Image (cartoon, grey):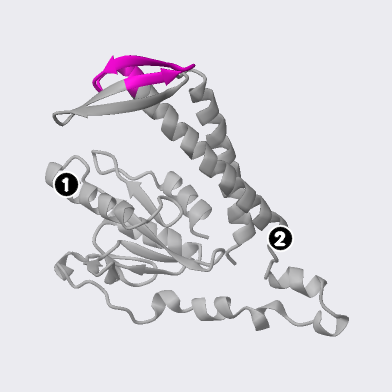
Amino acid sequence: MYNSKLYAEKELEYQSELAKRYRKELKRLPEGKLSVNTVKGKPYYFHLSNGERKYLGSGENEVVKDLQKRYYLEESLKRIDSNQKLLQKIGQEYISINLEEMMTQSPKAYREMPIDYFNLSKQNSSSWGSSKYERSQKYSEHLVHQTLKGDFVRSKSEAIISNIFFTKKIEYRYEEVIKINGKIIVPDFRILVKSENRIKLLEHFGMIGNAEYMEDVMWKVKFYLENGFKPWEDIIFTFEDIYGNINTQLIDKIIEEFCR
């Protein structure tokens, strides 16, 4: 089951590390602030420090860039500080809904129930990947590689990925037609991640030596990022090399880490 406390702890760890890097970077940047005057549409900057005002010229001045960077690092640190307090509070006050933990804290009369009897997500998810869904029919003649699950995919690499899912008993849907912010899109795989009780996407990219194909790849990656999908958290990207080879051991490790 997805654990919000665990997520909060990981996010707190990430933001704490980020704060360290930002503070280290601030030490090498000049002290002070910027002011700007605009003359005929062109900005002219001044450095304000220790009660003095020094003219810096245009935005091409490196000191201008450094002071702008300082501003955003300092603002980021303020937000990180606020986030850390909130995340710490979540970690301290979050109440788990993990059934095993609940059973140890419950009256004796309720402790002997089989866990599988209550695990609704497990019961519902067992056939999710095999249930009917709208699958892309585009270029269906290219669906020539059969998987262990019995369906057909377009490439040997996708068959390998499908078979890894199957052998690990990870429910997936291949080329399901979905809508994201009103736009129809067909991810290679939608995966039911049981440990988090939610769906993730996996896009596998081959033919990276093909310039036209790579344009489609970059568009798709940009689309996901612009629509709030976070790499590894919401979507996983895997690639072949320029010769069309796939590192099955690496992909197996990625699936084990992010899709169980």
Give the SS element for disc 2: helix
Outermost residue toward the front?
Answer: 51
Res. 93 image quadrant: bottom right
Residue stretch in magenta: 46-64
**Which residue position is annotated with label 1?**
215
Mark 1 residue crowding within 10 angstroms, few (<14) / some (14–19) / many (20+): few
Q: Is residue 224 left or right of residue 29?
A: left
Q: Residues within 10 Å of mark 2 (few under 14, many from 20)?
A: few
Expressed as whole percent of the image width and height from the top left, the position of residue 238 reads 35, 48
Which of the two labelled residues, at mark 2 and mark 1, occupies the earlier sequence position? 2
Figure quadrant of residue 176: bottom left
Residue at left offset 70%, top offset 77%: 115
Residue found 21% across the figure and 51% down from its top: 219
Relative to 179, 231 lies left or right: right
* Closer to the eye: label 2 or 1: 2
Q: Nearer the viewer, residue 155 or 232?
A: 232
Q: Is residue 255 visible?
A: yes
Q: Residue at x 33, y 60 (%)?
A: 159
Q: Is residue 194 magenta?
A: no
User: Could you say where residue 185 lies in the image, as x and y percent from the top left?
Assistant: 24, 65
Q: Amino acid at mark 1?
A: Glu
> Residue 51: image x %, image y %?
47, 17
Q: In front: 93, or 224?
A: 93
Left or right: where does residue 247 sit relative to residue 242? right
Residue that badge 2 annotates: 93
Quadrant in the picture for the N terminus: bottom right
